[in-house]
Image (tube, rainbow, N blue to C red):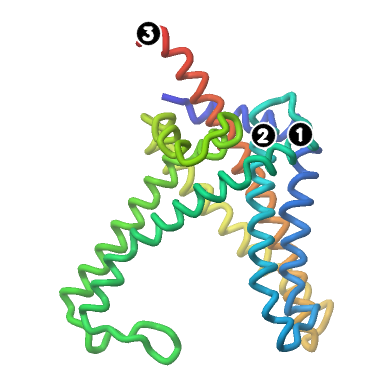
Amino acid sequence: MVRIGDVWDRTVDVLRGRTAILTSIALVTLVLPGIVSGALGTIVPLPGPAALAVPLVRLAVLVLLILGVLAMTAVASDPAVDRAQALRIGGQRLLPALGVLVALVLAAIALFVPAGALLAISGATMGMAGTPDMSHAAPGYVIGAGLSVLLAIVLGLWLSARIVPLFGIVVNERRGFSALRRSLDLTKGSTLKLIGVLILYFIITTVAMLAATSVVGVIARLALGGDAPGGVAFVVAVVRALISAGATMVQSVFYARFYVAAVEREQRMAPLA
């Protein structure tokens, strides 16, 4: 079993020792794209036809995020990798990573299909505001749908824990879809601890995001005035991009160091097999 405490200690060591490289990658692939995305519709007006470009910009931001995570994974996995090499490796492994992520998204959607089917059978309808109208739904089917959602959440947490070293495998072992099976092998015996880490990470990140954006929002309103909602929204978007980039950097390094620790454990155990 991989010791999570040791993984965290190594994560801190990497964050301290390679701060400049990691920060520069995060700035280019996470922060700046996030700021550009936040500017659209806030301080940058989008007349009718131009609004159609927003989904393309959002997609580009997502691709850059994945590129950044791959590059940071390369940096955290190998101390000999510099920024240029990391970005090159990220670009080389981008398509395999995207393919694996698409498969995971489809799997996540499939987890919630039973709940949607039960709600449809129950007689629930979609209200004017886009929310389900349960007034004519059969209670038994609604309960079944609720239980299906809970099961989907549990399975989603389990799957999220089992794919923690996924990008480490994609980057260092140059695998595609076979990285999923490899990830399941490397996380054996660590699933519950990883689920605990994921829950803790989610709570800390959510609280930090809400607290920071709320405080900054108030300050921005006082500084810019109530007649500049676009400016306030942009300032909040910048803060959100910074916090999200920092959280993603820490997460990427932790995942990479877990991968390294799992591989080292596997190599130690091999002669005993």
Q: Is residue 27 above or below residue 241?
A: above
* Residue kind at label 3, given as amino acid type: Leu
Q: Is residue 232 above or below residue 163?
A: below
166 sits to left or right of 65: left
Query: How far is the residue under mark 2 from the one under mark 3?
Result: 30 Å
- Nearest to N terminus: mark 3 or mark 1: 1
The residue wearing badge 3 is 272
Q: Farthest right residue? A: 223
- Nearest to N terminus: mark 2 or mark 1: 2
Residue pictured at 53% horizontal, 48% vertical: 201
| Residue 97 picture quarter | top right
| Residue 55 picture quarter | bottom right
- Nearest to N terminus: mark 2 or mark 3: 2
* Residue kind at label 1, given as amino acid type: Gln
Q: How many residues crowd around disc 3 within 10 Å: few (fewer than 14), some, or many (20 or more)?
A: few
**Labelled disc at residue 85:** 1
The residue wearing badge 2 is 74
User: Where's residue 139, x and y in %?
Assistant: 18, 78
Q: Are marks 2 and 3 in contact (CB under 8 Å)?
A: no
Q: Which of 155/199 is in front? A: 155
Q: Are marks 2 and 1 in contact (CB under 8 Å)?
A: yes
Q: Farthest bottom residue? A: 128
Numbered disc 2: secondary structure: helix
Q: Farthest top residue? A: 271
User: Where's residue 108, x and y in %?
Assistant: 40, 57
User: Where's residue 110, x and y in %?
Assistant: 35, 60
Q: Is residue 186 above or below residue 195?
A: above
